[in-house]
Amino acid sequence: MFKDTRMDHGRILIVEDEAIIGKEIELSLKGLGYEVLGVVSTGEEAVERALRERPDLVVMDIMLAGDMDGTEAAAEIRRQSHIPIVFSTAYTDDETLARVKPTAPYGYLIKPFDQTDLRITVETALYKSGMEEKLRISEQRLRQAQKLEAVGTLASGIAHDFNNILSAIIGYSEMGLSKVNDADPLHKMFDRIHKAGRRAKNLVQQLLEFSRPAGVDLASVDLGPLVLEVLDMLSPSLPTGVRTEVSLPEGPCLVKVDSTQMHQVVLNLLKNAADSMVQGGGLLSVSLVMGSQADPEAAVCLPMFDRQIEVGDQDCTCVKLEVRDTGCGMGEVVRSRAFDPFFTTKASGEGTGMGLAVVHGIIQSYGGWIGLESEPGLGSALTVCLPQAGE
């Protein structure tokens, strides 16, 4: 039995240069409950609409009028995205099949086809695409977890010896400061040594915070008041022109965390968002949402927890914190490295690149997950999802 994908994966773009056939496919898909984004007749239009609107599926005629046929359009769409393609064609010769194979189509509709053929092909393609997307996400998380685990193991291994060295540097610089008059040029040198030692010690501490699990002293914390507290603390230092918007539910949003660590998480997320708007200002919005088995949006979050929870379980509830900005946004390369330790786009001396790495480690240790959506010029949205704690 096919999974019913029409409600959550139903946005389809039709590419067909025969107007009557395109209209028939559109009416059939709408009758089956899918959302049709439109019918386009050329390969160039297909590429532009697909990459701009990101449909869940493209139904593509192979033979199109114009400079770009269906196979070329499909190849360009697949080169820049994971959007699945289903070909519709009246041609089944070996030459045609050989041309379309490199585009890895998700199915074929042989003209003329009826509504049953259309439904089976579309639902099969959407189901396969959904499974592949879940696999891609799982592989990305595994690679990220392995990368962070390697850095964490290294940090834990060197932390003790490194801290001993830093303690000597900090201790002797403090002794030097106490023995040298403020007006002496040596005082300034000792002060710089002392500050550098402190920064290095803080950096080691940050590495340890993201690499080791949260302590056993966890308690139920209401995220609503915590978010307001951090916003109130951060407001005086926000860049000029940055406005804030907060959306909180009426009831408590309880999660089992260490309040100090969670304060650090929220502060890092808000500060990063504000920093992205330092040039031209913008809107910093923060929202808290309660998810449950009755909320379709929550289904996206649930499989990310340490134990797999299926929609319908009585305890599959979560608290979702979203921090959104209208700043400069990130390209694919920066986005893929955003949680890497020591990776930063800030100028030298303005950041260590450990903020999001620490946040990732803390959230993961609570059995939650953090996601990032961003496009250049369109801002960013960071979402933290944590298992809800009982009253």
Image: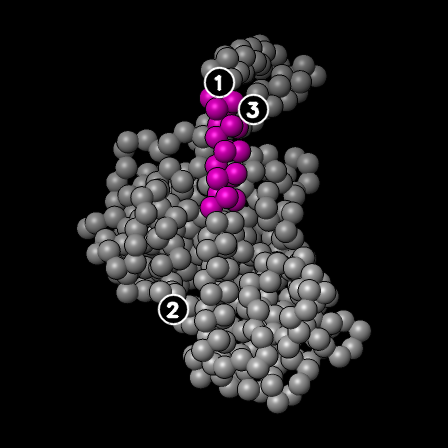
What residue lies at 47% left-to-right and 46% top-to-bottom? Answer: 138
Q: Is residue 205 magenta?
A: no
For disc 3, the marked residue is 200
Closer to the camera, 234 or 42? 42
Image: 20 above or below 260: below
Q: Amino acid at mark 2?
A: Asp
Quote the CA–CA distance across marks 2 and 1: 50 Å
- Return the residue nearer the eye: 293 or 162: 293
Q: Is residue 228 visible?
A: no
Q: For the residues labelled 2 and 1, say whether their Cβ atoms are less than 8 Å apart.
A: no
Q: Secondary structure at mark 2?
A: loop
Residue identifier under label 1? 157
Which mark is first along the chain, 3 or 2? 2
Q: Position of residue 371 (x, y in %)?
A: 48, 51
Q: Which residues are magenta?
A: 138-156
Mark 3 or 1 closer to N-term?
A: 1
Residue 4, which numbered label? 2
Quadrant position of residue 93: bottom right
Amino acid type for the residue under numbered disc 1: Gly
